[in-house]
Image: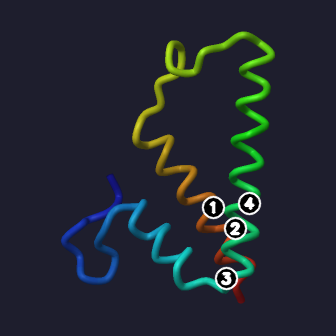
Amino acid sequence: MFFDENDPFFGGSVEDKFYDVIFHASRALAQKEINAMIERIAKYEVLMERANIDPTQYLEIDEESINDYYIQYMGNILSNNE
């Protein structure tokens, strides 16, 4: 892992950093990004339902993949919060 949780500047998990970004970004920008995330999740759920896929049965996701999404959404917020 690239992150040292004990480092005073870069410490903490990717998830913690994501929430730091969300809580310190402008409310409108954070709301826009969260709404986009919810819309994306809803679309995936509809696609899985139409394909008769039970996500709890077939899908396992590792921590690295989850962290990639946190980083992607942080980047979206930070690049628009200038």
Inspect the image, locate mark 4, and give the three-letter code of the amino acid beneath it: Asn
* Residue at the disc numbered 3: 27
Which residue lies at the image location 19% right of the left edge and 71% below the top edge?
A: 6
* Residue at the disc numbered 1: 73
Inspect the image, locate mark 2, and give the three-letter code of the amino acid beneath it: Asn
Earlier residue among tags 1 and 4: 4
Q: Between marks 2 and 3, how big is the CA–CA gap?
A: 14 Å
Earlier residue among tags 3 and 4: 3
For mark 4, give the secondary structure: helix
Mark 1 or mark 4, whichever is nearer to me: 4
The answer to whether the residue labelled 2 contacts the one labelled 4, judged by CB atoms less than 8 Å apart, is no
Q: Tell me the tag on residue 76.
A: 2
Q: Between marks 1 and 4, how big is the CA–CA gap?
A: 12 Å
* Residue at the disc numbered 4: 35
Tell me where residue 44 appears, x and y as whole percent.
73, 33
Question: Where is the C terminus found, in terms of image quarters?
Answer: bottom right
Q: Residue furthest top?
A: 52
The answer to whether the residue labelled 2 contacts the one labelled 1, judged by CB atoms less than 8 Å apart, is yes
